[in-house]
Image (cartoon, coloured by chain):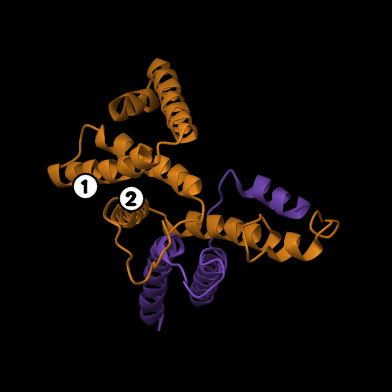
Amino acid sequence: MLNQNQSLIKFFDAASYALILLNIILASLFIDKNLFNPYIISKQYIFIGLLLLNLLFFAVKIVLAKKISYRLSMLDVPLLVFLAVL
Amino acid sequence: MSSLFSVNLYDSFLGRTEYFVLNFVFLLFSVLFYFVIVNGLHNPQRWRGVFDTMLIVGGAGSTLFILKTLFGLNLPFVGYAWNVVDSLNSSFGLWMVVIFILAAGSLIKKNIGVSRALFYFFIMILAAVPLLVMGFAFLWWCCCLVLFYFYYWGLVFCKMPGWVGFRFCLRC
């Protein structure tokens, strides 16, 4: 069971990385000609959709590992303050 | 808070469809993307992969722009658009400045293989061509400022003793 969880965690970790790469590729290159402005909505929907999927994978990883592993960075607090002000 | 007290509440919160305005939803997801990147990229190979992907995407965007402007080709999924990044060519040019600087900065590193050096070289050329085609003075000023910024930090790190200064000197 533990071994199966480890392989699933590895899978979701790799899938999360693949989604980051896919987000960079599609958010930059994808446009929808059928829209009035082909750039704004199509790029934002792709970006937000893939990011939500990535967050879901991150949550599944936490559930499978049964521990919250979060990597701290020096910009965490300034960004949270920025979001609060926003 | 600022969205709630904004004159245009919905525009400030959700943005507009006709043109881009900074909005709460976009900024919120941008911050979440930062957290996902920090937690997802936990080794140098992954950072290298993201970096190379950015350069490849930049090269692809530049190629589409060159095909459109120099050869007049309208690709099926792009249509009559000039570039795939933004409706304004100046925004695309700014992005090309970033790609150019990243590719050129990677090219001048000492310990890279021939294939990687060729890859950086072609991306650098691909990023430089749209800048030459557009020729906006504003873009050249941006490029100049970024180069001086790198030069300044190169000087600062060269004066720093120890491993950090040594590594930065090797890079520059």
Q: Secondary structure at mark 2?
A: helix
Q: In which chain is the residue bearing label 2? A: B
Q: Quadrant of residue B67?
A: bottom left
The answer to whether B56 is drawn above or below residue A78 in the figure is below
Q: Quadrant of the C terminus of chain B?
A: top left
Dot label at residue B119: 1
Rendered location of residue B57, percent (x, y): 35, 56
Do the residues bearing badges 1 and 2 touch, measured as CB atoms within 8 Å?
Answer: yes
Q: Colour of chain A?
A: purple
Q: Which residue is mark 2?
A: B55
For label 1, count other residues whose C-alpha is less than 10 Å away and answer few (under 14), some (14-19) or many (20+).
Answer: some
Task: Using the numbered discs, state the Cα–Cα distance from disc 1 to disc 2 in whole angstroms.
Answer: 9 Å
Rendered location of residue A20, percent (x, y): 43, 63
Q: Residue at x 40, y 41 (%)?
A: B134
| Left or right side of B106 for A65 | right
Q: Secondary structure at mark 1?
A: helix
Q: Please give the count of numbered marks on the rendered protein.
A: 2
Q: In which chain is the residue bearing label 1? A: B
Q: Residue at x 83, y 60 (%)?
A: B4
Rendered location of residue B94, percent (x, y): 46, 43
What's the amino acid at mark 2? Leu
Using the image as rendered, state which of residue B92 and residue A48 is in the foreground: B92
| Left or right side of B12 for B70 | left
For residue B60, say whether it is visible. yes
Residue pushed farthest left?
B114
Q: Which chain identifier belongs to the orange chain?
A: B
